[in-house]
Amino acid sequence: MPLLDGGSRITNYIVEKREATRKSYSTVTTNCQKCSLRIPNLVEGCEYYFRVLAENEFGIGEPAETAEPVRASEAPSPPESLNIMDITKSTVSLAWPKPEHDGGSKITGYVIEAQKKGSTQWTHITTVKTLDCVVRNLTENEEYTFQVMAVNSAGRSDPRESRPVVVKEQVMLPEFDLRGIYQKTVIARAGDNIKIEIPVLGRPRPVVTWKKEDQLLKQTQRVNFENTTTSTILNINECTRNDSGRYPLSAKNIVGEVSDVITVQVHDIPGPPTGPIKFEEVSSDFVIFSWEPPQNDGGVPISNYVVEMRQTDSTTWTELASTVIRTMFKATHLTTGVEYQFRVKAQNRYGTGPAITSEPVIANYPFKVPGPPGTPQAIAVTKESITISWNEPVTDGGSPILGYHVERKERNSILWQTVSKALVIGNIFKSIGLTDGIAYEFRVIAENMAGKSKPSKPSEPVFALDPIDPPGKPIPLNITRHTVTLKWTKPEYNGGFKITGYTVEKRDLPNGRWLKANFSNILETEFTVSGLTEDAAYEFRVIARNAAGAVSQPSEPSDAITCRDDIEAPRIMVDAKYKGVLVLKAGEVFRLEADVSGRPPPTLTWTKDEKELEDTAKLEIKIADFSTVVINKDSARRDGGAYTLTASNPGGFAKHIFNVKVLDRPGPPEGPLAVSEVTTEKCVLSWLPPLDDGGAKIDHYVVEKRETNLRYKVTGLTESHEYEYRIMAENAAGVSEPSPTSQFYKACDTVFKPGPPGNPRVLDTSKSSITIAWNKPIYDGGSEITGYMVEIALPEEDEWKIVTPSAGLKATSFTITDLKENQEYKIRIYAMNSEGIGEPALVPGSPKAEERMLPPEIELDAELRKVINIRACCTLRLFVPIKGRPAPEVKWTREHGESLDKATIESTSSYTLLTIGNVNRFDSGKYILTIENSSGSKSAFVNVRVLDTPGAPQALKIKEITKSSVTLTWEPPLIDGGSKIKNYIVEKRESTRKAYSTVIANCHKTSWKVDNLQEGCNYYFRVLAENENAAGVFSEPSESSGAITAKDEVEPPRISMDPKYKETIIVNAGESFKIDADVSGKPLPSIHWLKGDHELANTARLEIKSTDFATSLSVKEAIRVDSGHYVLLAKNVAGEKTASVHKSQPLPRIQ
C-alpha cells in the first residue's frame, strides 16, 4: 500500500505493463482490490517492466515501477540424460546436455547431488555452470547414483538421475573413435589448413604417436600433432600436394596397443602436361600434335585440356579448344608457311594448371618433291607403240610416290609432250600412236604430295619398228665342267635394222630365275658361258637387239645341259664340195670351211706344203672352238695345192686335205698379128699360141673387130614427156638429109616388180580361220605398192588358191576364213605395183586352223586403277576389256560378300560391264572381277567411293537446362558418307508446332548451347550432319531429344559438414580454428555466416572464404569473445538451409 493514502481510503489499484523493447505502458487491470496480481498471457522469454498506481476518491496517484526488467519464465525442463564419462578410484566424471526448454529464462547453473547405495538421502555435491562435472573424494568400491537439476531465475528443474556406478579404477584397451572421419580419409584443397581431431579412449591414458608413411612424423611449425586427455589432434597448416599420403597412428597403454591409418588427400590444380609436345603430322594447313598427361593430376582425374595457339610474330595466344579429352589435337585452318607455337594446359575440377609450350613449327608439307626417276628403258617396241620401264627415284622426298608422268619427243625435236593422260601407277608405260620408223625419246617425272620431281634423263632414241623375231634355239657346241659353248641362228626378221648384239641368259634347273650370263655385248651367234658349277643342270636362252634399240623376245630355251667334262676324239666335217678338187679362177675368193667336234674342244692347225699357215692381208684364218675357215681374198695360180686341217685333243686327232686348183686366163697370143689377103669383104689373120695356157688347154681363140661408134646419149629431157628422134650424117662435103623419124618415147625411169613382203607371221588362229600379218616389202620396185595377194595350199600339194579379192588388199593383215578344222596350210603373200605381182613371201611353218588357247587377261585402264569417286543417286558403270580363249567365264563379287542384286552385269568375249543405278553409300567398297577359262584365271579389283550424305548424328543428350537455354551434346555419325563431316545443323521446334526451325547451320563441334528460349515452353531438338562432298544436302536427323521444358533446374540448398563439427569445439586461447563445409543447390545459393543474430564479415582475425560449392570460416588467435554459436546459412529461390556447429546440442559453444 502507499505510505500516503492522500487522506482518503484507497479504493483500488491500476496495474500496467510494457515490454522492455517498447516505451509505452499498457493497462493490465484498473480495478485490482488486492496488493498482488497474477498477470497471464505473457510471452515466454520476453522481458517486461511493470508499474502500479493507487486510486482514491480524489484520483490516481504516482506509479511505483520495477527497477529491472522481469523475464516471463518458469523452471526449466531437466537435462535429457546424465552420462557417466569416466570413473577412477575416487572420482566420477559426469556430463549432460542442455535441457530442451530453459523455462523462458537463462539457465544460471546446474545442481549436482549424489546418493550412496542403501541410503535414501541425496547429498548436495556442487553447483556448476558448465555441462560437465567431476565428482571427487568418493569412497572406493562404493556404489553411487547421481542426479542433476537445471536452475534458472524461476527455480530448479526436476532431477535427472544417472545409472548406478561403482567407484573403482578402470582398465581399458586403447581405442580410436573414427566415426567422425568418413572412410578414414580427409580431403582438403591445397592451401587450406587441416585439423584432424580423433577421440582416444583407454585406461590408463594411452600414449599416442603419429607417422607419415613409414617414418615417425617430424613435428614442425606447419605440421604437428598434440595429445589431450581425450583426443589426439593432427594439424597441417597451408597443406600442399606433398602432404598427401598415409598417416598411421598408434595408441599404447599397459593393456595393449592399437593402430589405424588416416589417409590425407590434398587436391589442387594439375601440374603441366608431360612434354615435350610431339608433332605427329605437319601439313600445309593443319598440325597434329600430342602430349602426355601431367605427372601431377592434382589428386583428381584430369577432366580436359585447354589448347592455345599463337603465331611466333605475335604475343597474343588464341584459345583453340577448351574441352579436349584426349592427349592429341589437330589444329586446322592454318596458313601455309606461317610459324606457330602451341601450348597445352590440363584442367580438373579445381581449375587449370600451368601450360607446356611447344617448339615453333611451320605449317608446311613435311616432305619434298621426289628425286628424278631412273632413266627409262624400252622393253617392247612395235611400229605403233613403245613400252618403257624405269626405276623408282632414289628418294621419294619423304612422301610416297603417287605416280608418274611420261613425256616423249621425236629424236630431232626439242619439244617434250606429256603422253600419260593420268598419273601412271607402277613403273611400266605403253606409248601408242607412234609413226612407223620414227625415233623417239622418253623421260619420266615422279609426283608425290609435295609436287613433281625433275625429269629423269632421256632414254636412248628408240625407233618405232616392228619387233625382232627371237633368235634360234641355242645348241651346245662344247660342254666342260665350268663352261658351255652355245651357238644359235640369227632372227628371221631383224625389225628392219641390223642386229647389233645378243644377250645370253641362264637359269639353274629346276626352279632357278633367269639371269644374265654375258657382261659385254655379243656380236656373233656363238658364246661361251663361264663360271658354271660342275654337275649342275642349266637352261640357256638368247635375246637379240638391233641398231634401232629394239629387243626381241627370248629364244626357245636350250635343252637341259649338265656341266661335266667328256673326252671325245676329234672329227672334221666338211661340205661335199671339199671332198674333191676345188677348182676356181684366178682373182676369185675361195673359202675352206670345216666344222669340228670333240671333247675337250680340239686344237686346230692349217698347213700347206708342210708349213703352218699364218694370217696375212690376203689370207685370213678364223678358228673357233668347233669351226674354222680359211679365206683367200685374191687367188692366184700359186695358191693352188693341198691345204691340210689337223684337229687334236687328248682323245686323238683328225686330218682333212683340201685340194685347190686355181685357173687363170691364158697369156696373150704370141705376135705379131699378121693380116693378109685383104679385100673389100674379108682378110686373113695369123698369130702364134700364148706362152702360158693358164693351167688348162686352149679351147679356142676369140677374134674381135671394131667399127666407128654410132651411138649417142640424149640428155636434158623432161620426165614423163614423149619425144621422137632423127639423125643426119656429115662429112667434109656437108650434111646429109635426115633419116626417117623414130616412134615416140616417154622420158621415165625403168620400173620393176616389187620384192617379197617382210616378216610374214601368224597373229591368231581358230577352228575355221587363220589371221596373218606382214610388213611392206623393203624394195617396192620403184613404184608404189598397190595391194597384196594371199594364196594358200595344202602342205602336200602344189595347187595354190587365191583367197584375197581380185583387186588385192590394202592392209598388211588378213583373216583367211572357211578353213577345215585342225588342217595345216601353206600360206604365201605377194606384193603388187604398177609392173605387176612381185616375189612371194612364205609364212613360216604350216599354220593349223585350230582354236588357240589364251589365258585370261584383264585390261584395267588408268582410271579404274584409281579410286572411283561417284556421287550418290548417279549410275556406276565399270567397263573392263578382257581377253582369253576360250571366252572366259566372268564373275563379279564384293570384298565382304555384299549382295550385287542391284547390279546389271553384261559380259562378252571381249569385255564385261557392271552397272549399278542410283548408288548410295552402301555401294562403296571393293568390286572384285574374276575371269576364268580352261587356260587359267585372273582377278582384278576396282575401289569405288560413293559420295553420299552422312548418317544421322548419334546419342543426342541434354547436358544442361536453364529457363532461357538448353545445352546439347551428341556423337558424330557412324557413317561419314565417304568424306569428312563439314558441320552440323541444330534444329528446334516448340511442342505446339509441327515444323522445325534452324538454330545454327554451321556448327563445327559436337555440342551447342541453344539460347533465347521462352521460359516454361516445351521444345524438341534434333541435329543433322553435312559432309564436304554433299554440300547443301544433309543427313537424316538424329533421334529427337524428346520434350524439354525451358526452366531453371531448382534444388534447395544442401550443406555437408565434417561430422567432427557436431561436437563442441574446444580451442585454447591464442590458437586458431577453422570451420569448413561443402554447399550445393540450384541456382547457386548465397552463403552467410552468423554468430548469434549477427552476420559475420571479414576482419583482421576472422576470414570467410566462399566459392560456388564450398565455404570456410577461419579465426586466428581465438579469445573468449569468439566463443558462441556459429550458424551457416545457405539460401536460394528453392529455400534455405542452416547448419550449426554441434553434435547433439542446439547451441554449441567455442570455449
Image (spheres, rainbow, N blue to C red):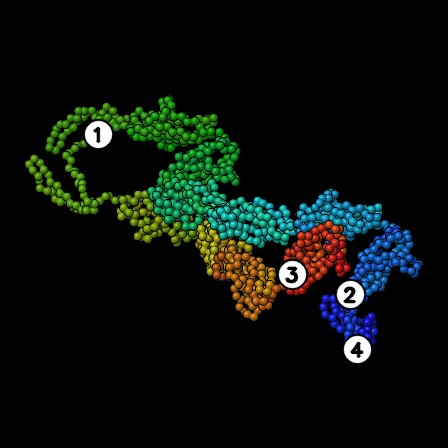
Q: Earlier in the sequence, mark 3 or mark 1?
A: 1
Q: Amino acid at mark 4?
A: Glu
Q: Amino acid at mark 3?
A: Pro
Mark 3 and mark 4 in contact (Cβ < 8 Å)?
no
Q: CA distance from mark 4 to mark 1?
A: 217 Å
964 or 921, which is in the foreground? 964
The label shown at residue 67 is 2
Q: Nearer the viewer, mark 4 or mark 1?
A: 4
The residue that appears at 64% across and 57% down in the rendered structure is 1108
Q: CA distance from mark 2 to mark 1?
A: 197 Å
Q: Nearer the viewer, mark 2 or mark 4?
A: 4
Q: Earlier in the sequence, mark 4 or mark 3?
A: 4
Q: Residue furthest front?
A: 7
The label shown at residue 1085 is 3
Q: Is residue 395 above or below residue 1119?
A: above
The residue that appears at 50% across and 35% down in the rendered structure is 562
Q: Nearer the viewer, mark 2 or mark 1?
A: 2
397 or 163, which is in the foreground? 163
Residue 917: x, y in percent? 48, 61
Residue 823 visible in the current orientation: no
The label shown at residue 701 is 1
Q: Earlier in the sequence, mark 4 or mark 1?
A: 4
Q: CA distance from mark 2 to mark 3?
A: 47 Å
Mark 3 and mark 2 in contact (Cβ < 8 Å)?
no
Q: Secondary structure at mark 4?
A: loop
The label shown at residue 57 is 4
299 or 920, which is in the foreground? 299
| 1096 left or right, relative to 547 | right
Q: CA distance from mark 4 to mark 3?
A: 67 Å
Q: Earlier in the sequence, mark 2 or mark 1?
A: 2
Q: Residue furthest right?
A: 118
Q: Earlier in the sequence, mark 2 or mark 4?
A: 4
